[in-house]
């Protein structure tokens, strides 16, 4: 009995050992990757050979095979891989295992250096480590052109680095080359806006950037963003000395070796990208979504308003006209109910438009505008049905008194008013009558409310918006009120009674930022920004100063615009006129303001290069390597 038990126990132990061994083997096979706490592979793939060989001369092959020491991936080849000279017929590029195969569809040009710039598109298959700044070069002639130029491309309006935009050279220095001929040599900007153009022969060039929408490698559409450099670029190099350090271990230096190397210049070209203002003027659309108004929308700003001659109505004194600052959207509010009850408005429209010769000429259109209400959503239809059902039930029970409909008003009078703030009233339609005697502003003195004066003024742009201005006293209570019938809208509705109380903030709730500016032009202005790069306030530079008072505590940035034409806004450039966009500068750091503090900052506009001015905290375009590090940290957790 004992022998049987011992035999059974031994068999159970053997079976348990066998099962645990198999389970361990299965788990190890299923758990592909690094064990927790293990080393993390940060080594990129290594290029080991190619057909033809790298740097080959007199090459006639259009099929190129590149080989690497491990399995690789090719990320976004359409965006990251750049062929120079540019290929009008897109090459076929295929990664497979440890190799990349490229088939060039264009015929090879004689005596030309070809460069395939991969940037950081090649990564290892497991961890995504990029083989950074990798390029492959060959020549159809006897020699390889080795010169390079480099620089940075920024958005001209906000100094944001631009990723993935073409930058190219033209040996033909005629102004028309950029608009009629494909670029000779090209590169593409990385996530920092940096670019490098390789394989350049000796000579003089003009350099451009191009958002190549139609992929013809020339500036052929006004919608394409561009940049151009004012100076001629002459690629060259100089011999420099660098020190390479050989380490015995991670802490001990073995040898410092001095080596000569060729440094290619220029390497600091700065390009500012912009889109030209649309100068083609035309009527984009006309619409009448409600009976009592219609809107004309133009594609760009206009200096004059169109004129209207009614066919089935008298246009004289028929409208209240609401227009945008640029005159590109114009709304006509119809005054007469007999007119806006017409099913279709018919009229002649005279306006200016750009013809095929790019000339601004008069044009006449005949418009017919029926009411075209936007389709209701299913949810809106269901809510409308429920509302009608409730009204019907109410009528069955008793005859309801219809509720008074008032003129819709959006009143902005915050309970905690800024010292520099104002009260704003916005209506859904233009006003026909305003009784300022029925509008009141009171100030609390001790326990009494005293009537005080104020300025009631319509907004300079929006005819449906009004402002109440008053020089507020800090830490004081106020009351704004309106009597019924104080304001009557264009279509007969009047306002209801309104009353809002508020208290003005204390002076101790604020701080101030003052800039002492060096290098600003006569019309410059400074925009104070939040950390999202949005404008909070704007002041003109006066006597080399830009001061911002009554600022709540918080983080602030600033940019300066050289308002060359003095119109109060940033203006873009124009290639045909050789006009660069207006200069923009950023203060180099984000300022943290505390209440009751005044920050006085000296700001020399040119003490830092433009690409080093905008604080990283404000940049939307983050470097790819920073994103990769963040991803790796998350994967290690």
Image (spheres, rainbow, N blue to C red):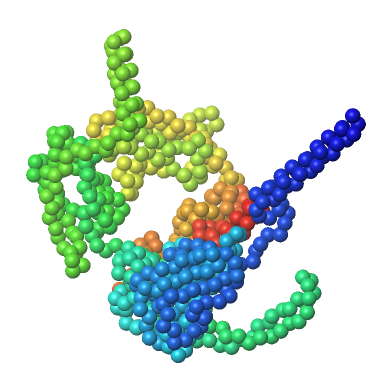
Q: Residue at x 12, y 55 (%)?
A: 364
Residue depicted at x 14% and y 54%? 350
x and y percentages locating residue 590 in the rendered image: 58, 58
Is residue 121 rendered to the left or right of residue 469? right
Looking at the image, residue 570 lies above or below residue 10: below
**Residue furthest right in the image:** 2
Image quadrant in which the N terminus is located: top right
Task: Kindly tell me whether residue 168 is visible in this rendering.
Answer: no
Q: Looking at the image, is 229 positioned above or below residue 387?
A: below
Left or right: where 620 falls relative to 481: right
Viewer-nearest residue: 175 or 182: 182
Q: Residue furthest top?
A: 397
- Give the number of marks: 0
Question: 246 or 294: nearer the eye?
Answer: 246
Choose between 165 and 348: the one closer to the eye: 165
Is residue 629 positioned above or below 402 on the image? Answer: below
Q: Is residue 80 shown left or right of residue 400?
A: right
* Residue drawn at the location 51% of the way across and 45% of the way down: 419
Can residue 89 be seen from the camera position used here? Answer: yes
Point out residue 347 in the picture as x, y percentages from the top left corner.
Answer: 12, 46
């Amino acid at each position: 009995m004992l022998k049987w038990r011992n035999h059974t126990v031994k068999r159970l132990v053997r079976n348990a050992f066998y099962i645990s061994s198999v389970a361990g083997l299965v788990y190890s096979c299923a758990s592909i990757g690094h064990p927790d706490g293990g080393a993390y592979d940060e080594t990129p793939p290594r290029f080991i050979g190619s057909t033809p060989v790298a740097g080959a001369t007199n090459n006639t092959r259009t099929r190129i095979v590149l080989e690497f020491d491990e399995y690789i991936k090719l990320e976004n080849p359409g965006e990251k891989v750049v062929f120079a000279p540019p290929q009008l017929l897109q090459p076929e590029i295929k990664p497979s295992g440890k190799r990349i195969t490229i088939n060039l569809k264009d015929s090879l040009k004689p005596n030309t250096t070809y460069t395939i710039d991969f940037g950081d598109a090649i990564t290892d298959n497991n961890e995504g480590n990029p083989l950074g700044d990798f390029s492959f070069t060959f020549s159809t002639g006897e020699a390889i052109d080795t010169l390079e130029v480099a620089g940075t491309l920024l958005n001209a309006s906000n100094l944001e680095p631009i990723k993935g935009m073409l930058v190219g050279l033209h040996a033909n220095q005629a102004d028309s080359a950029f608009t009629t001929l494909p670029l000779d040599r090209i590169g593409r900007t990385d996530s920092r806006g940096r670019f490098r153009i390789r394989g350049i022969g000796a000579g003089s060039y003009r350099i451009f950037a191009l958002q190549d929408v139609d992929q013809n490698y020339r500036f052929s559409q006004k919608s394409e963003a561009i940049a151009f450099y004012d100076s001629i670029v002459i690629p060259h190099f100089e011999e420099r000395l660098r020190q390479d350090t050989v380490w015995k271990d991670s802490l001990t230096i073995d040898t410092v070796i001095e080596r000569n190397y060729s440094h290619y210049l220029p390497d600091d070209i700065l390009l500012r990208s912009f889109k030209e203002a649309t100068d083609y003027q035309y009527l984009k659309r006309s619409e009448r979504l409600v009976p009592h108004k219609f809107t004309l929308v133009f594609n760009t700003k206009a200096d004059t308003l169109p004129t209207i001659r009614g066919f089935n109505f008298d246009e004289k004194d028929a409208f209240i006209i609401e227009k945008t600052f640029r005159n590109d959207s114009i709304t006509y509010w119809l005054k007469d109910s007999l007119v806006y009850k017409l099913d279709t408005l018919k009229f002649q429209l005279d306006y200016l438009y750009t013809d095929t010769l790019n000339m601004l000429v008069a044009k006449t259109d005949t418009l017919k505008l029926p009411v075209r209400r936007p389709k209701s959503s299913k949810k809106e239809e269901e809510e409308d049905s429920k509302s009608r059902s409730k009204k019907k039930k109410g009528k069955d029970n008793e005859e309801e008194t219809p509720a008074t409909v008032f003129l819709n008003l959006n009143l902005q009078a915050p309970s905690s008013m800024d010292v520099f703030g104002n009260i704003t009233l916005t209506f859904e339609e233009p006003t026909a009558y305003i009784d300022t005697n029925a509008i009141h502003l009171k100030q609390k003195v001790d326990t009494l409310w005293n009537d005080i004066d104020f300025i009631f003024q319509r907004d300079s742009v929006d005819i449906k918006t009004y402002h109440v201005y008053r020089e507020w006293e800090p830490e004081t209570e106020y009351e704004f009120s309106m009597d019924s019938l104080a304001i009557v809208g264009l279509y007969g509705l009047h306002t209801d009674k309104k009353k809002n109380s508020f208290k003005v903030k204390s002076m101790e709730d604020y701080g101030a930022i003052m800039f002492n500016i060096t290098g600003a032009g006569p019309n410059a202005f400074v925009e104070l920004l939040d950390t999202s790069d949005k404008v909070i306030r704007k002041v003109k530079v006066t006597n080399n100063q830009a001061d911002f008072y009554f600022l709540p505590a918080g983080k602030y940035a600033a940019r300066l615009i050289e308002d060359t034409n003095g119109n109060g806004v940033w203006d873009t450039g124009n290639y045909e006129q050789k006009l660069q966009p207006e200069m923009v500068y950023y203060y180099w750091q984000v300022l943290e303001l505390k209440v009751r503090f005044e920050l006085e900052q000296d700001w020399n506009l040119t003490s830092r290069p433009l690409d080093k001015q905008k604080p990283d905290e404000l940049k939307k375009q983050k470097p790819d390597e920073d994103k990769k590090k963040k991803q790796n940290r998350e994967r290690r957790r």
